[in-house]
Each structure stands twice: as structure tokens, then as C-alpha cells.
DNA sequence: GATATATTCAATTAATTGCTTGAATAATAG
DNA sequence: CTATTATTCAAGCAATTAATTGAATATATC
């Protein structure tokens, strides 16, 4: 074969390793989670509803295409995204959201009939935060809150929400957020709160998006 | 099944349509070419060494995942990249180049033993262009030159290079470029020129990269 | 050293994909 | 209207891939 042709074939073959890695829905979900922070195999398996063995295999595909890195910590293996990978994933998500109409449809269908799911006006929200006119809830697990959260938010993990209801002012509006548009923790939180007579709405954006928009993010307790 | 799980499955399934589209080396090559400008099926088939039927099928996969758009012009069907797609492709290329060591290896192996293939110092090159100290050749087909070229470059399509040799000053250094690091037109041009006693080197970057670096790009004859 | 836990490996199955071939559909030119 | 050219369609084959299952490794604890 022509050496020029051969060169191109070899090059694009290497490129396609990245493409193959992101051609599986489950691997994309794993990547999305990993872009929130490092995770063990077990946690990833639970979050994606996969068996541990299957999760491990997917992670190895991601590792072989250099999209994730692996680190042994005691009994656990902790996976994390490789540099630049989250930007790439974000770019892919953007193309998908902008070009594939079905995504908007699926979102609308899922949220149909639920209260408080309308998009929040961000500029108005920022003003209301400054006026202390609204309670912001971060309903993700506490570790994720510690790693970074919207400045001024309260850490109220979804499974503790019911217990902590008493501490929430009933007259103030509540804005709940989680990992982003495809994380459902905030959806469940808002449903629960509205069922209990609170006025709660969902902020679709996650911390990543919040940071990407240049808004203040805090970390720690 | 849990409706939350169902929602996520459906969403990531849609995302994976983009991933599946870029999981094939040949489709990546097609995308790369399309990011240089719109093309007919026939031309794409020739450039990628695929049969026309096979090219058409790949293009339909790209179309179904919304990465390319189609337009009938007389007897021809002209394909072009959808908005945002080239940025996405570029981001993917960057991840691949930075993370997959084999790519550098393949490049080096291909260029091994060829003269004038060492990377060109861009800042030095810019100065030399300003001093009119160097001849820049754009060795792509003339249509591509017209669509956009490095300011100050001469259009000398590779297949006309031998005929136009007489017009090139033999004492000045020649810098040839084409579509980018994986296009071999400039490689062949430099080999030919060095064989004929010229001092020629290859600029790896294409017009896209040149523009991305904020440098001046001209269009027209 | 034995046990428990987290992860990976290996083999199997069903489904999907890329490429080839030959025929079918447009759109244009004579 | 017929011939030509560009593209797409349809069927078939070989190769690849995702998920399942059960076993094997590795690390820590008792």
C-alpha cells in the first residue's frame, strides 16, 4: 500500500481510539461522573447501575484510550479523568445538546408535570443571592460539596433533606442544584420540598457550569 | 425500570450518537477534510481511498448524528460540517495528540530520513516573512487556496510544482504548507524541492491552525 | 495464616458495525 | 427519450463489541 495512505490510516486509527471510547453511553456516563471528581470502581458501578465487572471493563477501555487515569489507594482503585478530557467531554456535550433535538425532548418529557423545573433566570438569581432573598441548597453528597460548591449554598444531601426540613425557612424561596442538567438529585429534592409546602425551584446548572460562567465557587465545609 | 435510570439511559444514548459517529477512523478522516471546506461525495471518496458507496454510507452516519449537513447542487451532493463540529473535532484531535504517544511515533516514523521535516520555529518564520526572506508555498488545490491561505503565500498546487519550478528563486529558502499535520502534500513538495537543489522545509500547521493562532489569513486569488 | 472485600480476568453469547457487491434513483446532456 | 454521471439503497459476510457469569488477584483485617 501507498505509504502516504498507510500513514493516514495509522493516524486516524489512533484518533479513533478516543472516538471508540466515547461511543458507548455507559462510558459517557462514567466520564461525566468522573469529571465531577475521582471515584472508585464500586461507586461508579452504583451510580451507573452497572455490575462491578462491567464497570471495570468500561474503565479499562477508557484507560486504554488514555481518557482516564488509575491510582491504587489501599484496597480501592480510584479513577480520575486525564487532563483536557473534561474540556473535550464538555465540547461533545455542547455539540450534542445543540444539534440533537431529541435531547431537549427527553428532558421535557422527563420533567413534564413536575413543579419548579422551569429554567431559572441566572442574573435574577445572582441578585437574589446578594439580597439574601433565597436559600440555595446543594443536594449532592457531602464530599462533593466539600470539593466545591456555589458560594453561599447549604450542604443538604438529598437523603438527609427530610430530616433537615425543620431548619429551612418556609417563607423564603428555595433553589436546589446538583451535578448538572442530567443529574436528578435536585429534581427529587424540589419535588419533595414542593410536596411539603415549600416554594422550591431547580437550578439546572451544576458547579462546573457555574464555575465556567465565571461565578464564585467555594470549597470546604 | 426506575424512571430516573431510564432518563439517564436515554440521555447518554443520545450523547453516544456523537461518539459513535467519531469512532470510525474513516469518518474522522472525512470530518477532517470537511473541516477544510465543503466537498462532494466523489471527492471525499477519492481523498479517503474509499469506494463511493462506502463513503456515502459513512456520510449518512455522520448526517444522522447531525455532524454534517447535506445540500444538493445539481448533479452533486455537497457535504459540509455542521456548526460547532469543527471545534469539537479540534478538541478531540488535541486530546489525541496530547494523550496518545503513538501518534508522535507514527509521525516520526513516517518522516524519518526525510529532509526539511523538522518543526519550524513559528516566531522566526513570521519575522522572515516580514523581511521577505522566505518564499511560502501553499501546495493545496487552487480552490482551497482561494477559500483561505496564509497571507503572502503563493498558490502552487503540488501537481503543478514541477512545472513552476522555474519561477521560484533558488537562493531563497522555501516553506511549504498544506492542510495540517496529517496532510502529506507539503511533505511531497518539500521532498521534490530538496531533490532539485532547493532549500525547502515543511510547515506542519495548516491554514486552520494559522488562523487559530491569530495570524493573518487572506482569501481570493 | 485465614478471611473478607475490591477489582480484574477469561470465556461465552447476542447484537452491531464496516465493507463489498450489484441494483436503484436522481439530475443533466445529447 | 436515451445515455451518462453522481449518489444512494439493499443484502450478505466477517469482525468487533457489550454484557453476563464465574473464577482469579490483590490488599487489608482479624
Image: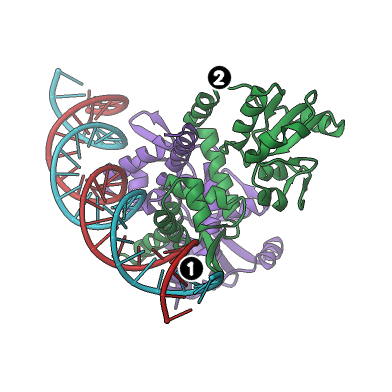
Chain colours: A purple, B green, C cyan, D red
Looking at the rendered image, the quarter that the N terminus of chain A falls into is top left
Mark 2 vs mark 1: in front: 2
Residue ID at (39%, 35%): A64
How far across and how far down the image is residue C28, in percent?
A: 55, 71
| In-front residue for pair A27/B173 | B173
Left or right: A188 in relation to A151: left
| In-front residue for pair B170/A115 | B170
The answer to whether residue B137 is seen in the rendering is: yes
Q: Residues within 10 Å of mark 2 (few under 14, many from 20)?
A: few
Looking at the rendered image, the quarter that the C terminus of chain A falls into is top right
Q: Residues within 10 Å of mark 1 (few under 14, many from 20)?
A: many
The answer to whether residue A36 is seen in the rendering is: no
| In-front residue for pair B136/C4 | B136
Q: Is residue B22 above or below residue A185?
A: above
User: Label 1 lies in what chain?
Assistant: A
Residue A190: give its label: 1
Residue bearing mark 2: B113
How far across and how far down the image is residue B62, in percent?
A: 46, 58
Indicate the secondary structure of the residue bearing disc 1: helix
Left or right: B165 in relation to A4: right
Left or right: B37 in relation to A178: right
How far across and how far down the image is residue A48, in percent?
A: 35, 52
> To which quarter of the image does residue B80 belong?
bottom right
Amino acid at each position: 500500500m501507498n505509504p502516504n495512505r498507510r500513514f493516514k490510516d495509522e493516524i486516524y486509527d489512533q484518533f479513533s481510539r478516543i472516538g471508540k471510547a466515547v461511543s458507548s453511553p455507559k462510558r459517557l456516563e462514567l466520564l461525566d461522573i468522573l469529571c465531577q471528581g475521582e471515584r472508585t470502581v464500586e461507586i461508579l458501578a452504583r451510580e451507573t447501575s452497572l455490575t462491578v465487572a462491567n464497570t471495570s471493563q468500561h474503565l479499562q477501555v477508557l484507560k486504554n484510550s488514555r481518557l482516564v487515569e488509575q491510582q491504587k489507594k489501599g484496597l480501592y482503585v480510584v479513577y480520575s479523568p486525564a487532563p483536557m478530557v473534561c474540556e473535550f467531554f464538555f465540547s461533545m456535550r455542547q455539540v450534542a445538546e445543540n444539534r440533537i433535538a431529541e435531547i431537549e425532548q427527553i428532558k421535557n418529557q422527563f420533567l413534564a408535570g413536575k413543579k419548579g423545573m422551569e429554567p431559572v433566570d441566572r442574573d435574577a438569581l445572582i441578585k437574589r443571592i446578594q439580597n439574601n432573598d433565597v436559600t440555595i441548597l446543594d443536594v449532592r453528597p457531602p464530599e462533593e460539596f466539600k470539593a466545591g460548591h456555589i458560594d453561599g449554598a447549604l450542604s443538604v444531601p438529598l437523603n438527609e433533606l427530610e430530616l433537615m426540613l425543620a431548619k429551612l425557612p418556609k417563607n423564603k424561596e428555595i433553589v436546589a442544584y446538583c451535578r448538572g442538567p442530567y443529574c436528578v438529585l435536585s429534581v427529587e429534592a424540589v419535588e419533595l420540598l414542593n410536596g411539603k409546602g415549600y416554594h422550591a425551584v431547580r437550578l439546572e446548572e451544576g458547579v462546573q457550569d457555574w464555575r465556567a460562567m465565571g461565578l464564585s465557587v467555594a470549597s470546604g465545609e
